[in-house]
Amino acid sequence: MKNRFLKTKVLTYILIFLLIILKFKCHPTKNHMPDKPFILNGQHTGVLKVTYGFRCFATDPDSDSVAIRFDWGDGNISDWSPYVPSGQVVMMNHSWQNADTYYIKAQAKDRKGAISEWSSEYEIIILNVSGIKCQEVGYYDTPGVAEDVVVISNYAYVADGLSGLRIIDITNPQNPLEVGYYDTPGYAFSVAVANNYAYIGEGPSGLRIIDIANPQNPLEVGYCETPDTVYSIALENNYAYVANDDSGLRIIDITNPQNPLEVGYYDTPGYAFSVAVANNYAYVADGLSGLRIIDITNPQNPSEIGYYDELWAEDVAVASNYAYVGTWNGLSIIDISNPQNPSQVTWFQNYSYYGVAVTNNYAYIAAGDYGLRIIDISNPQNPLEVGNYIAPGFSKDIIVLNNYAYLANGECGLRIIEFYEMGIK
């Protein structure tokens, strides 16, 4: 009797289990198509044959992974991207061969094959203008993390993190060679060079002065303690102007390199990441406190006379009446013709810009994972990206000389990029 009861109970459970399976087979969980993608940003104006990147994301109601594709508006549709988690940004690149106005849109697909509607259109105008061709011609993989670079004559001086100062002969850009180094005791974040001396900004603190008269045998000759990390150095006359993180702008007299002395400072409200000096003013990229303008007519008593704080300032370069400020989301061009009242002319939104160099009518940008970006600034009200190159590594800073850009590319060392107008080569 007991066994019969047990068998009946087991059969009942089996029957219930089979009914549940049958229910789900007859009424499977409904799969929903992904939401319409959203194109985050990209160019709104471009030039012929230059590749531009566009970022997009899509969410899925069922939290499925999604793939993205782009319709570029010129008859070309990209392949599907690899699947990424719902809401993760996908970036794709494209170039256009004809001058016209194009309307880009994106679409998403989940792993079960459900496809979303097309996104709203994103307009880009391609101008009949020649772009700039970029190609890497050489590199030197430094032993540390390349944070900053300066080029003087035939040498590149690299602030290389825990590996100090590295001196690289770039006489032949296709075959750069290290000829000397000085392993500073801290972490080398920044470098400036003048009159046979290299000035190394270190973390956690300090400015080190290295005699580089003999590049094969650099020697430290002086040191000045600072309260915080030296992220940037600008040299003017006999002074080193130091962006000193939480301690603002420090001014160091380097008349005697063997005995540098701090003579003045201005404690900016943010975190001083970069400094440029022009016409008795120091322009400080001060992190969340934006651009600060400091009167340094009297280095012993610097005073702030103006600021523009509606941005996060990472780096700054000054040319003519404009400050070009690298921010977490693009390039801000600020009119400084009146230093007491600086005003933003335009914000060229795109990538995070970590290093900025300005030469002639171009701003050259070290844009982290997005490499070298070249912006035509001949009309500051309407900047235009005309060339780019994504080099290995993370582009932290840049210097430009003649038709070469030298990138401090983090763990991938020094990268040398040649650039020229399309059609010349």
Image (spheres, rainbow, N blue to C red):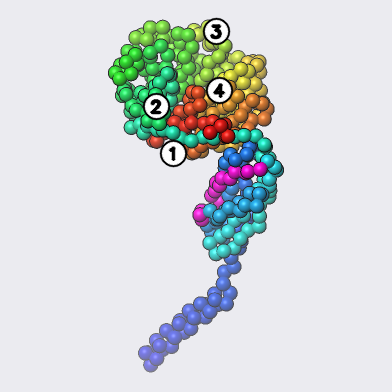
Q: State the separation of the CA atoms marked 3 and 4.
A: 26 Å
> Foreground: 44 or 200?
44
Of marks 4 and 2, the one in the foreground: 2
Residue at (61% x, 29% y) in the render: 376
Q: Which residues are magenta?
A: 82-98
Residue at mark 4: 359
Q: Secondary structure at mark 2?
A: loop
Q: State the separation of the CA atoms marked 1 and 4.
A: 24 Å
For the stretch drawn in magenta, what is the main secondary structure? loop
For marks 4 and 2, the one nearer the N-term is 2
Q: Secondary structure at mark 4?
A: strand
The amino acid type found where label 2 is placed reads Asn
Q: Quadrant of residue 313?
A: top right
For marks 2 and 1, the one nearer the N-term is 2
Asked whether disc 3 touches disc 4, contact meaning CB atoms under 8 Å apart, the reply is: no
Q: Which mark is residue 172?
A: 2
Judged from this view, the residue extending furthest toward the left is 217
Residue at mark 1: 392
> Foreground: 268 or 285?
285
Q: State the separation of the CA atoms marked 1 and 3.
A: 42 Å
For marks 1 and 4, the one nearer the N-term is 4
For marks 3 and 4, the one nearer the N-term is 3
Q: Secondary structure at mark 3?
A: loop
Q: State the separation of the CA atoms marked 2 and 1.
A: 20 Å
For marks 1 and 3, the one nearer the N-term is 3
Taking the magenta stretch, the answer to whether it contains residue 334 is: no
Residue 329: x, y in percent?
57, 35
Of marks 2 and 1, the one in the foreground: 2
Residue at mark 3: 297
Residue at (45% x, 8% y) in the render: 238
> Foreground: 128 or 220?
128
